Amino acid sequence: MTELWERSAVELAAMIRRRELSARELLAASLERIDDVNPTVNAVVTLVPESAEAWAAEADAAIARGDEIGPLHGLPIAHKDLELTAGIRTTMGSPLFAEFVPDVDGLVVQRLRAAGAVTIGKTNTPEFGAGSQTFNTVFGATRNPYDIGRTCGGSSGGAAVALATGMTAIADGSDMGGSLRNPASFCNIVGLRPSFGRVPSWPTRTPWSGLGTSGAMARSVDDLALQMSVVAGPDPRVPISLPEPGSAFTAVLAETAESLAGARIAWTPDLGLPVDDAVRDALSFVPDRLTELGAEVTSDRPDLHDAGEIFQTLRAWHFEISAGAWYDRSPQQLKDTVRWNIESARSHSLVDHARAAAAHADLVERVRAFFERYDVLALPTSQVVPFDVELDWPREVDGTAMDTYIDWMRTCSDITLTGCPAVSMPAAFTPDGLPVGVQFVGRPRSDVELLGFAKVWERAVPVGGLRATVGGS
């Protein structure tokens, strides 16, 4: 018999709607699963079972009353520990916020709760989201469920592991340089970095920037689309938010296409960057499989030659805005990479920032022209496979030294600058049993169409159903 933790979010929501399953029963199953596997992987770092039980009881009462219910009604969710949650500890992975309890929910949390999701706690993240390896001095490291001696990626690593192990069926995440996509690749799940402005973030100190964005993670494209239907859509407090409603994503749930006939795809095995042989070998089948699905595949890539320098400059600016005041008060309590970003920002001149902004504009124009020829760009999500959990970041990729903690994830961070939607999909496993994801990048603002494309891939390459065996699973 299929256990509740193995079922999809779409299926569980339908069961609750049909009164075949109560929210309290599903919560109990989720808490049992957390008890079973979380001590091994350390993904859920703050748990609020009493509050969750009260919310689940109210969800069941709403069903009994015949109230109109939301699409996520009764589904347990744990929020990334960078998301503000009213009345629930939000540490940012930092000792400076180890006991911080906000009095307001962030916008994504507001939308998830309004759609009926039941908050059960928070998922682990590196300090201030700095780095694609989930560890901090508050809670320690989160481990990869496919090999607990390796990292799960980050910064949405706790969310990825919670999904991969069935502790939750949906999870929110965020992405600046790959924080949704890298852990999705490392944990064999789906992670979408949406277009700039597709999922508004509030409160924010950078309301005009789309460099960082909230997004969605799931075990399938349908589950991800269900969550996107709730979290996407405009908000008057966020000036860059796109006008289309989240309900546009429900079209993905009805998508039945089994081919990619007519799709024009550019394939690059490396984006011109160093990529480990294990990743290259695992994804070598991708262009042929896309061709078999009816797509026209061409070896090509956009010109992103200056993306690394642009990203470093803009990211440093973000860290100065978000954490500069804490650096001034308690620099010794900040992670070294957080300090480095802030110090980098302060070493840049106004001219440096102006040149980065101008170069970014040129890059976006080159990418726009590139997508006049193609519908999708396909490439590796990560340049490496999951590495040792005790290693903070890889110092070398395919024999090339990495100068900073960001350089090894440029197949994600370079794509960030395009503003285009990008989804990491399960693709393959190495001979050692480590997951490897493929990244599909869509034309500007083509989020819904991109997920329809990804759904065809998912049917043809169903490795996402190969779950890790952790705890009593």
Image (tube, helix red, strand yellow):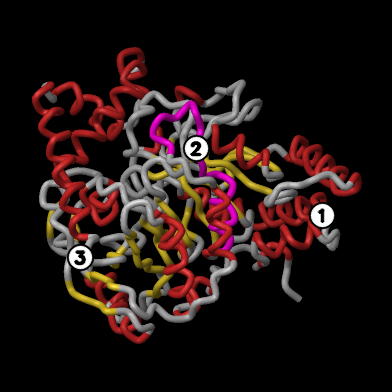
Where, by quadrant of the figure, is residue 3 drawn? bottom right
Q: Is residue 420 visible?
A: yes
Mark identifier at residue 392: none
Q: Are marks 2 and 1 in contact (CB under 8 Å)?
A: no
- Horizontally, residue 418 falls left or right of residue 60, namely left
SS label for mark 3: loop
Q: What residue sits 55% from the left and 31% below the top?
A: 106
Secondary structure under tag 2 reads loop
Residue topped by disc 3: 270
The residue to which callout 2 is attached is 234
Rendering quarter of residue 318: top left
Picture residue at 50% right of the left edge, 37% below the top? 234
Q: Earlier in the sequence, mark 2 or mark 3?
A: 2
Tell me whether the residue at label 2 lies in contact with that at label 3, contact meaning CB atoms closer than 8 angstroms. Answer: no
Density class for disc 1 (Cα within 10 Å; few <14, some 14-19, many ≥20) is some
Viewer-closest of 402 and 445: 445
**Nearest to N terminus: mark 2 or mark 1:** 1
Judge the density around disc 3: few (<14), some (14-19), many (≥20) Cα neighbours within 10 Å.
many
Query: Residues at badges 3 and 1 in contact (C-beta under 8 Å)?
Result: no
Query: Distance between the Cα atoms at labels 3 and 1?
Result: 46 Å
**Magenta span:** 222-241
Residue 308 to residue 192: above or below:
above
Disc 2 crowd, CA 10 A, few/some/many (<14, 14-19, 20+): some
From the image, tell me which residue sits under label 1: 25
Badge 3 or badge 1: first in the primary sequence: 1
Name which residue type carries label 1.
Glu
- Does residue 213 appear to the left or right of 5 in the view shown? left
Task: Name the residue rendered at 43%, 37% in the picture.
Answer: 241
Q: Position of residue 217 (x, y in %)?
A: 51, 54
Kind of residue at disc 2: Pro
